[in-house]
Structures are given as C-alpha cells and as structure tokens.
Image: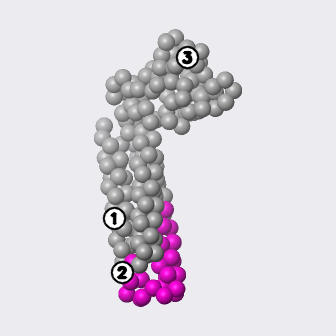
Amino acid sequence: MSDVKTVLDNSKDLMEKSIKHLEMELTKVRAGKANPAMLENVMVDYYGSKVPISNTASVNTQDARTLIIQPWEKAMLTPIEKAIQAANLGFNPQNDGVIIRIAVPPLTEERRRDLTKTAKSLGEDAKIGIRNVRKEAIEKVKKLQKDGLPEDEAKDAETKIQNITDSSVAKIDAHIQQKEKEIMTV
C-alpha cells in the first residue's frame, strides 16, 4: 500500500508543479496593466554576460500604465534600454539619465484576442503535462498490480489518480478563465 501512496503523492506533487508553472507563465502574459513580470525574460548585457534585468535593476510600477526601472549602476542605463528594445515587447523605454520609464500602451481589441489565445495555449500545455503525469501514474499502478497488488486496491488508486487529475484540470481552467477576464477588461 505504501507504494501506491508514493505513486499518488508523486503524481499530486507533479500536477501541482504544472499548475505553479502555468501561474508563472500567465503572469508574463500582458493584461493591459503594467506589471514588472512583463520584463522578466529581458536579458541585459552586464559586462559581457547576459543576465536577467532583475539582476541589474529594480523594476516597479509607478501606476497602472507605467513601469519604472531603477538600475543599481548608472552605467547600466543604456544596456538596459537597449535590451528592452531588443526584446521586441512593443515598449519604448524613456531614459532620463537616472531611471528608465516605460509607458505601457493600452491593448487593442485584436491584441487582446491574441493574448487570450496565448493564455489558452499555455493552459492546454499545462493540461498535457497533467495528462502525462496521470498516464505515468496509472502505468506504475498497473506494474504494482503485476507485482502482487490486489486488483481492488489498483482500481481504487486509479480512481484517486483520476480525481487528482480532474481537480488539477479544474484549477487550470479557473486560472485561464481568470486571465481571459483580466485580458479582456478594458
């Protein structure tokens, strides 16, 4: 029975990790409001090596439409500005010699639909990950059954795995609906 519990616990942990990953990815999808996570993937040339923008400056929001980037070294203003432009995020950074301001433009209706599709795609990827975890867990239970696990315990374990899967998929759907609502709110 402890082998079955291990399979169930591992499956649940892996599915939770898929959901956490989805949550992180969804924070990067722009929803009209300025969010420091929008710049998370921007890599800055820091004395010859590429590092995330968060390693060279603090990124904050001034208001719902403005990001403020405060470099820790004044010499990093230009490399940060160039990295933001090179990231092709559709932003036009304004360097005033002390900080960099980014005015986040409002989203067009077409861009909102594209972002909604992106969010749905991320959700589908997460669901594929969940289904793969379920498949592996059921295969492990069947292997345990061949090794002597009673059939009723195996069926019970498969039912539990399916319940965990259904719960995880419901969480993913809720996250996607929330993000779509966020994106489509003008």
Amino acid type, label 2: Asp
Q: Which residues are magenta?
A: 129-157
Q: Are marks 2 and 1 in contact (CB under 8 Å)?
A: no
Q: In whole angstroms, how far apart are the C-alphas of marks 3 and 1?
A: 47 Å
Of 177 and 184, nearer the camera is 177
Residue 152 among those drawn in magenta: yes
Q: For label 3, count other residues whose C-alpha is less than 10 Å away and answer few (under 14), some (14-19) or many (20+).
A: few
Query: Mark 2 or mark 1, which is nearer to you?
Result: 2
Residue 119 image position (x, y, % from top left): 43, 50
Answer above or below: position of 67 versus 132: above
**Pointer 3 residue:** 73
At 39% from the left edge and 31% from the top edge, which residue is drawn?
34
Taking the magenta stretch, the answer to whether it contains residue 146 is yes
Of all residues shown, which one is farthest toward the right? 48
Return the residue at label 1: 167
Identity of the residue drawn at 45% across and 55% down? 17
